[in-house]
Image (cartoon, rainbow, N blue to C red):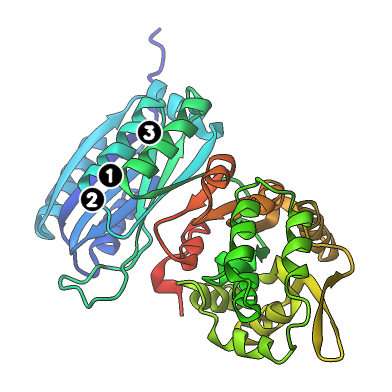
């Protein structure tokens, strides 16, 4: 007696290419539906009206796979598309499914304009680490053919699968490419925390603002060069921050309080600061200034940029003049990290859901504690120590690290 023949479903990967227009995907999927197929996976991209559509379908046992393939080829031809197909063996399908639990990462390439050299170098880095590229997405807007003279931004996001073969070599390579090819590369694990950041804390001096405010105050007091030298040494980590702050503030003794609003009015925001803060507010993020600078200027920025919280040092003022002292606990490196933790706890979130941005050595503990710590146009010691850096674009580049596209922004 002959054993009955068991007919199983067939898995086919179809690839359609051609000139894009409305209705193509609907027409193709409608024909699959007539055969009772299941859609297992789908990926579609359009580049300058050129369609690339991949559909992995499972053809039921009662349908004839050859008939489905023939029908889809004819339909594609009617639509002006090319159709290729590949049958997926059960063993190959099972291997594909088993890869579902592999680690996933996001590699973000930031540049003023992405060159082929940059793209090739990053792609080779990914391949050398044994990683698979699942999806490549352009987050930045379409570049104009003729420059309008405004600063440009470009961002490409790589969605990767697998684990890097050598994490230490990977980090070194990311830093090397960034310095050699004038780009920034941000490496993040693609997990639930990345998609659920809720708080953004920013340093003020040389981050939100282009200047170090204490240097500007010192110019008014006639001790600009002296204070600037101490500031630079402190930001490089060569002098204890508390000591450097006391020394610098002491030199301001006797300066009239009336110069502070004049200084505030002439301070220039960093490129992209307003765009970043306005969009973070729109997306529901809580924003904070956590600064080793001075509260007076933090409050000025709070009103200008609609920042939620300000933590900074208080200058002592008596009889309308600066005394050369600060009041209360100094906001130093450790205090910055503690304030970030307190802010996260106050709204009931994990520190992994926070973002911190800064440029100096006194920002490192805060950057390390945050889920996403970004060294922004930072000193060398900070770039080497921080997990992420932005050195080629403005502050609004941070939005790309959150996966936000230009088209979603105001």
Q: Identify residue for label 2.
A: 115
Q: Identify residue for label 1.
A: 119
Q: Are marks 1 and 3 in contact (CB under 8 Å)?
A: no
Q: Are marks 1 and 2 in contact (CB under 8 Å)?
A: yes
Residue 148 coordinates in the image, percent (x, y) = 22, 78
Q: Quadrant of residue 87?
A: top left
Q: Is residue 309 left or right of residue 372?
A: right
Q: Nearer the viewer, residue 133 or 5?
A: 133
Q: Are marks 3 and 2 in contact (CB under 8 Å)?
A: no
Residue 356 seen anywhere in this rendered image of the structure: no
Q: Quadrant of residue 195?
A: bottom right
Q: CA distance from mark 3 to mark 2?
A: 17 Å
Name the element at disc 2: loop
Q: Nearer the viewer, residue 90 or 169?
A: 169
Residue 58 coordinates in the image, percent (x, y) = 37, 39
Q: Is residue 87 left or right of residue 130?
A: left
Residue 405 seen anywhere in this rendered image of the structure: yes
Name the element at disc 3: helix
Name the element at disc 1: helix
Q: CA distance from mark 1 to mark 3?
A: 11 Å
Q: CA distance from mark 1 to mark 2?
A: 6 Å
Q: Is residue 216 left or right of residue 239?
A: left
Asked if 209 appears above or below 140 in the picture, the reply is below
Residue 39 coordinates in the image, percent (x, y) = 40, 47
Number of other residues with Cα within 10 Å of mark 3, as a class: few under 14, some 14 to 19, many 20 or more: some
What residue is shown at x 21% (from left), y 36% (from top)? 66
What residue is shown at x 73% (from left), y 57% (from top)? 244
Q: Nearer the viewer, residue 177 or 96?
A: 177
For residue 126, the mark is 3
Q: Nearer the viewer, mark 3 or mark 2?
A: 2
What residue is shown at x 51% (from left), y 79% (from top)? 268
Number of other residues with Cα within 10 Å of mark 2, as a class: few under 14, some 14 to 19, many 20 or more: few
């Amino acid at each position: 007696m002959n054993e009955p023949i068991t007919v199983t479903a067939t898995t086919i990967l179809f690839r359609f290419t051609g000139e894009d227009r409305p209705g193509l995907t609907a027409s193709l999927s409608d024909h699959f539906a007539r055969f009772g197929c299941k859609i297992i996976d789908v990926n579609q991209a359009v580049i300058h009206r050129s369609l690339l559509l991949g559909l992995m379908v499972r053809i039921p046992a009662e349908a004839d796979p050859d008939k489905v393939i023939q029908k889809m080829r004819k339909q594609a031809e009617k639509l002006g598309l090319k159709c290729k197909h590949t049958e997926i063996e059960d063993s190959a399908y099972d291997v594909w499914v088993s890869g579902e639990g592999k680690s996933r990462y996001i590699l973000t390439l930031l540049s003023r304009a992405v060159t082929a050299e940059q793209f090739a170098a990053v792609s080779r880095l990914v391949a050398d680490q044994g990683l698979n590229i699942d999806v490549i997405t352009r987050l930045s807007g379409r570049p104009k053919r003729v420059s309008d003279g405004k600063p440009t931004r470009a961002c490409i996001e790589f969605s990767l699968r697998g684990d890097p073969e050598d994490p230490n070599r990977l980090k070194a390579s990311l830093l090397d490419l960034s310095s050699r090819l004038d780009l920034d590369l941000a490496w993040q694990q693609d997990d639930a925390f990345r998609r659920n950041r809720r708080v953004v804390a920013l340093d003020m001096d040389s981050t939100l603002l282009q200047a170090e405010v204490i240097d500007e105050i010192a110019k008014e007091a006639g001790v600009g060069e002296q204070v600037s030298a101490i500031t630079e040494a402190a930001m490089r980590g060569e002098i204890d921050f508390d000591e450097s702050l006391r020394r610098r503030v002491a030199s301001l003794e006797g300066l009239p309080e009336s110069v502070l609003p004049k200084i505030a009015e002439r301070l220039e925001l960093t490129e992209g600061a307003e765009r970043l803060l306005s969009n973070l507010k729109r997306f529901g993020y809580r924003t904070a200034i956590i600064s080793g600078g001075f509260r007076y200027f933090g409050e000025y920025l709070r009103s200008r940029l609609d920042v939620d919280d300000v933590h900074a040092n208080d200058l002592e003022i008596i009889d309308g003049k600066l005394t050369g002292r600060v009041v209360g606990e100094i906001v130093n490196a450790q205090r910055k990290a503690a304030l970030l933790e307190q802010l996260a706890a106050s709204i009931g979130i994990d520190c992994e859901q926070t973002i911190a941005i800064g440029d100096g050595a006194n920002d490192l503990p805060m950057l390390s504690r945050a889920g996403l710590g970004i060294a922004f146009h930072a000193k060398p010691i900070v770039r080497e120590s921080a997990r992420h850096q932005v050195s080629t674009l403005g502050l609004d580049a941070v939005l790309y690290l959150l996966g936000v596209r230009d088209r979603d922004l105001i």
